[in-house]
Image: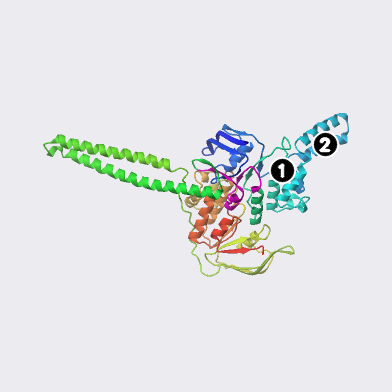
């Protein structure tokens, strides 16, 4: 059995508050298709980078019995042809090929000896099979032959993602033709449209061996057979689907909360009993002067005092038990949106709206109305104009035909695919934007981000934490209309469900682009499909 083993792994970033991992023990079978899950900031990306060797543990060790490959992958030359970019991601094959060509061109005896040695090494790592392997993996991911000689930079973001994922699974490219690679995949679904996600889920579901970070619930169910969960207090490894694990996890937490509530009541009752018995004992002692049988009164007082002490000890024991029962339970904080003073009447009305890019319509003849309380999902494949439609609603004037009307009094709050604040001190950004720190802390805590986040630099936070900052800005805006462009990228599943809950409870007016099918199904009151 091939495994990755973490033994007593401890790791923390310099200057950070506390360690990400403390004495972590974990075993992962490299035959598993594992979902790595946990709230933002729990160390999912950090664990992948530790396994890959990009980071070194402070203490402990990681044992790998198999070569690993990490996604996302760097692209050295984005203007190179697609097949060459993937080839470079797999290994330095093109560099070796260029060196062999130079040695042959030299033709000297020393050059030919060096050529023979390099050729043997090239054959040993599967150099002559690598191109056919690349083509097979690209085709399996829907990147057909017509793409292979195109510049990589000309592909959409989703197509580029699929190409680089293909490079993880090209066989025979390490120390021998039968050697496989264990893939470490971090957030591959960001910016992939619904069809792209389904295609990728089918592809990964047919593979053997990877560790995958994604917050798309349907995607994880479609391609994973194990769950590795980085919880608040524990690490769980279970052979199951993601949804089945999450339901059992929720049930466990619900039982813990119920036990905790019962223990709180018992602690309060015992505390009251102890107080009453102490008071009774003191009263008995005070009565000794008025009675002849002072010994009898004193004995009764002592018995009551012993009972009071016993009740206090039971209360302390129950309190300790209560502390131990709350394993992995997060502190509940309800997320809430400010009241915008919702106005009557339609906020946006589009009639036969078409947006143009050059001489080509990005989308054509779309009509819709957004009324107060509507939650409108804009869906369609990458490149169909979803972001451009949000731009147009916000007030940017793309070339268009038809009409889009939004009254001047309608205030808009916008989030983007990439957060606006990506570096600098968060506290300074809040001051510049006029956002009250205490309210911002409350929203971030509800989204699972606590500690000294206001005192730190944004570039030191995880992608998910940065995205939550961007969402918190929109939550705190007094806006009549929220425009969200892929708001859930990098956002953990707990926070996604909190956002779903607040949208359903507070019923803001929102037009959003999102590829998480579960989110769209639960919150959308209307869907605008731009692929039609």
Q: Is residue 506 left or right of residue 287?
A: right
Q: State the residue position of label 1.
A: 170
* Marker disc for residue 100: 2
Q: Is residue 209 magenta?
A: yes
Of residues 342 and 140, the one drawn nearer to the viewer in this rendering:
140
Residue sitting nearer the eye, 268 or 471: 268
Percent x, y of residue 27 = 57, 37
Q: Residue at x 77, y 50 (%)?
A: 148
As rendered, which of 223 and 364 lies closer to the eye?
Answer: 223
User: Dot 1: within a 10 Å radius of its alpha carbon, few (fewer than 14), some, or many (20 or more) residues?
Assistant: many
Residue at disc 1, secondary structure: loop
* Picture coordinates of residue 147, whole percent (x, y): 76, 52
Specify whether residue 205 is in view. Answer: yes
- The disc, 1 or 2, on the residue closer to the chain's N-terminal end is 2
* Foreground: disc 1 or disc 2: 1
* Magenta region: 204-231
Whether residue 399 is situated above or below residue 427 in the rendered picture: below
């Amino acid at each position: 059995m091939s495994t990755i083993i973490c033994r007593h792994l401890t790791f923390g970033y310099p200057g950070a508050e506390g360690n990400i991992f403390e004495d972590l023990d974990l075993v992962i079978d490299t035959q598993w298709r594992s979902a790595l899950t946990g709230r933002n900031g729990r160390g999912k990306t950090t664990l992948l980078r530790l396994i890959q060797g990009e980071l070194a543990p402070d203490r402990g060790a990681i044992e790998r019995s198999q070569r690993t490959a990490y996604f996302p992958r760097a692209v050295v030359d984005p203007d190179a042809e697609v097949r060459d970019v993937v080839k470079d991601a797999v290994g330095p094959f093109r560099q070796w090929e260029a060196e062999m060509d130079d040695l042959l061109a030299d033709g000297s005896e020393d050059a030919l000896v060096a050529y023979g040695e390099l050729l043997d090494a090239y054959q040993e790592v599967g150099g002559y099979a690598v191109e056919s392997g690349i083509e097979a993996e690209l085709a399996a991911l829907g990147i057909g032959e017509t793409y292979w000689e195109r510049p990589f930079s000309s592909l959409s973001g989703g197509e580029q993602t699929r190409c680089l994922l293909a490079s993880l699974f090209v066989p025979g490219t390490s120390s021998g033709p039968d050697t496989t690679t264990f893939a470490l995949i971090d957030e591959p679904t960001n910016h992939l449209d619904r069809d792209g996600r389904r295609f990728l889920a089918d592809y990964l579901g047919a593979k053997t061996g990877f560790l995958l970070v994604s917050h798309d619930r349907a995607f994880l169910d479609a391609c994973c057979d194990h769950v590795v969960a980085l919880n608040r207090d524990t690490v769980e490894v279970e052979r199951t689907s993601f949804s089945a694990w999450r339901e059992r996890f929720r049930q466990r937490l619900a039982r813990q909360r119920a036990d905790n509530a019962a223990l709180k009541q018992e602690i309060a009752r015992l505390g009251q009993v102890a107080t009453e018995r102490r008071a009774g004992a003191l009263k008995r002692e005070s009565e000794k002067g008025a009675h002849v049988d002072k010994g009898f009164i004193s004995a009764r007082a002592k018995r009551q005092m012993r009972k009071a002490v016993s009740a206090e000890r039971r209360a302390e024991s129950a309190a300790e038990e209560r502390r131990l029962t709350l394993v992995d339970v997060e502190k509940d904080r309800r997320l809430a949106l400010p009241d915008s003073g919702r106005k009557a009447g339609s906020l946006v009305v589009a009639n036969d709206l078409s947006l143009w890019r050059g001489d080509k319509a990005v989308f054509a003849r779309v009509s819709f109305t957004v009324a107060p309380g509507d939650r409108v999902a804009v869906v369609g494949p990458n490149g169909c104009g979803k972001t451009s439609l949000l731009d147009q609603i916000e007030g940017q004037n793309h070339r268009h035909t038809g009409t889009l009307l939004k009254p001047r009094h309608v205030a808009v709050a916008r989030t983007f695919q990439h957060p606006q604040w990506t570096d600098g001190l968060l506290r300074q950004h809040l001051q510049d934007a006029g956002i009250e720190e205490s309210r911002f802390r409350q929203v971030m805590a509800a989204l699972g981000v606590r500690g000294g986040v206001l005192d730190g630099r944004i570039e030191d936070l995880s992608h998910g934490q940065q995205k939550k900052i961007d969402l918190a800005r929109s939550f705190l805006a007094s806006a009549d209309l929220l425009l969200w462009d892929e708001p859930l990228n990098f956002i953990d599943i707990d926070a996604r469900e909190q956002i779903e809950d607040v949208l359903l409870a507070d019923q803001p007016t929102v037009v959003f682009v999102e590829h998480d099918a579960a989110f769209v199904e639960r919150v959308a009151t209307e869907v605008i499909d731009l692929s039609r």
